[in-house]
Image: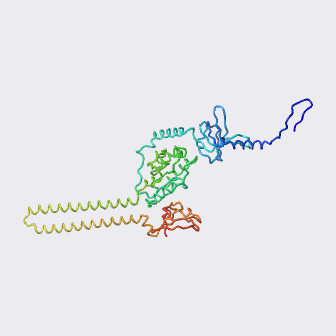
């Protein structure tokens, strides 16, 4: 609507008045529809950082001229790098918090300003702990040759634990595996890993421990570069094998551990020998014993014969003594043969016992191996639900089956060992 005054004033246009909420929603929609603001990287200095009980992170990014309000909700990554004064790079989107009319940067990931900052922190930590003697080769312990109980500190839901169990089931089913669960990435991972080592130290019958996680970036593996984790490994009551990331990754945990493995699967191979190798060792020992006994018999016989020849030269009539000596030699030869046969029998018994421990023999006694749909060995009924597919391996083949229902009950200690085998 327009009107003209008699005094000759200019025409005035009457505009529609919008509510505050409508304007705020329009601005919010405009900001979020700009693709440049929906996928944004911002570098700046952290100030006014707050981390309330909700687990969310509130802070501001600033430089010499401007300040940008920021929020990162609990699922975001890299919160451990947020401290007042730290220089960081944040990824997220720009939007408007309509309740207050505040322009905010909604962050979903934080990392130090350049990987160089992380690498610098790693080198500083490495030099300081090396000076304290935490990496000293002389303090590192030998692994037990035949461990009875092996602790594994890792995530209970990742592929790492399945890889370790599969290798141990195939190579060394004699050991019991004790899983000590922990998160292996994120803000709280370092504290949880420390708690896992405290739980390890409270157990009296663990022979060796593996701490492991899969590969990732330097930021993903950073929990294993934390000082508290390094000191927890150093204080472990048992030898520790570190298997963090890929072969090219190196963490502080690797340097402190008694043994470093290039991968989690390699850690499972290092921790104990294969049953087949043990059987080969026994066969080798048997051959050596047989050779030693045979050599001893030959040497003693030669000495007896030499003594007889000397007596024959000195004593004119040695018929009766020589007969007696021949009898003694015959008896000694027979005794030696019996000793050899007895030793061979005992060694054969040991070989048969070891052979009976092999997976194939165990299956022939009526046990089976149940596998999940992904092919890994099942260690608990709780891994199945009605309708799941499974494969059951017998000594002479396998069958596929579908689960009708599951019942989870407590098992005796000698049966709850997680080796994936069950009695048919």
Q: Residue extending furthest right?
A: 6
Residue 42 drawn at (x, y percent): 62, 38
Q: Compared with residue 65, is residue 257 higher up or lower down, i.e. above or below?
A: below
Residue 326 drawn at (x, y percent): 16, 67
On screen, residue 99 versus residue 357, left or right, reads right
Q: Nearer the viewer, residue 343 or 121?
A: 121
Q: Residue extending furthest left?
A: 316
Residue 329 drawn at (x, y percent): 18, 66
Name the quarter where the N terminus is drawn: top right
On screen, residue 195 versus residue 147, left or right, reads right
Question: In the picture, residue 351 is in which quadrant?
Answer: bottom left
On screen, residue 405 versus residue 147, left or right, reads right
On screen, residue 99 versus residue 304, left or right, reads right
Question: In the picture, residue 158 is in which quadrant?
Answer: bottom right
Q: Compared with residue 317, is residue 265 higher up or lower down, i.e. above or below?
A: above
Q: Nearer the viewer, residue 262 or 254?
A: 262
Q: Compared with residue 191, is residue 388 higher up or lower down, i.e. above or below?
A: below
Q: Nearer the viewer, residue 69 or 238?
A: 69
**Residue drawn at (65%, 38%), measured in percent from left and top?**
60
């Amino acid at each position: 609507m327009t009107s003209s005054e008699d005094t000759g004033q200019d025409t005035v246009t009457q505009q529609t008045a919008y509510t505050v909420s409508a304007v705020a929603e329009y601005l919010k929609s405009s900001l979020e529809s700009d693709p440049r603001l929906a996928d944004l990287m911002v570098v700046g200095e952290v100030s006014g950082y707050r981390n309330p009980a909700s687990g969310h992170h509130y802070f501001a990014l600033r430089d010499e001229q401007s300040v940008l309000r920021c929020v990162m909700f609990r699922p975001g990554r890299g919160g451990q790098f947020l401290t007042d004064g730290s220089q960081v790079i944040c990824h997220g989107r720009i939007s408007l918090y309509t309740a207050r009319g505040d322009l905010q940067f909604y962050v979903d990931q934080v990392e130090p300003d350049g990987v160089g900052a992380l690498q610098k922190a790693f080198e500083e930590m490495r030099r300081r702990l090396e000076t304290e003697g935490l990496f000293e080769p002389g303090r590192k312990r030998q692994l037990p040759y035949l461990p009875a109980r092996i602790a594994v500190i890792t995530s209970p839901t990742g592929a790492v634990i399945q890889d370790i169990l599969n290798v141990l089931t195939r190579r060394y089913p004699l050991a019991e595996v004790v899983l000590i669960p922990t998160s292996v990435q994120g803000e709280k991972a370092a504290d949880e890993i420390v708690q896992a080592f405290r739980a390890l130290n409270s157990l009296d019958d663990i022979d060796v421990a593996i701490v492991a996680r899969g590969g990732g970036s330097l930021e993903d593996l950073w929990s294993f570069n934390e000082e508290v984790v390094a000191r927890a490994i150093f204080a472990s009551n048992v030898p520790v094998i570190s298997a963090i990331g890929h072969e090219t990754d190196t963490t502080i945990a690797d340097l402190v551990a008694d043994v470093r493995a290039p991968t989690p699967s390699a850690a499972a191979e290092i921790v104990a020998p294969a049953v087949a190798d043990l059987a080969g060792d026994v066969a080798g020992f048997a051959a050596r014993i047989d050779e030693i006994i045979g050599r001893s018999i030959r040497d003693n016989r030669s000495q007896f014969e030499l003594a007889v020849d000397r007596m024959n030269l000195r004593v004119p009539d040695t018929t009766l003594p020589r007969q007696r000596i021949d009898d003694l030699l015959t008896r000694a030869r027979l005794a030696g043969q019996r000793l050899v046969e007895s030793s061979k029998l005992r060694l054969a018994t040991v070989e048969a016992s070891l052979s009976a421990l092999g997976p194939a023999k165990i299956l022939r006694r009526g046990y089976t191996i149940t596998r999940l749909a992904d092919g890994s060995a099942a260690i608990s009924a709780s891994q199945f639900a009605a309708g799941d597919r499974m494969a059951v391996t017998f000594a002479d083949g396998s069958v596929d089956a579908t689960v009708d229902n599951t019942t989870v009950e407590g098992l005796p200690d000698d049966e709850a060992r997680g080796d994936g085998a069950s009695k048919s």
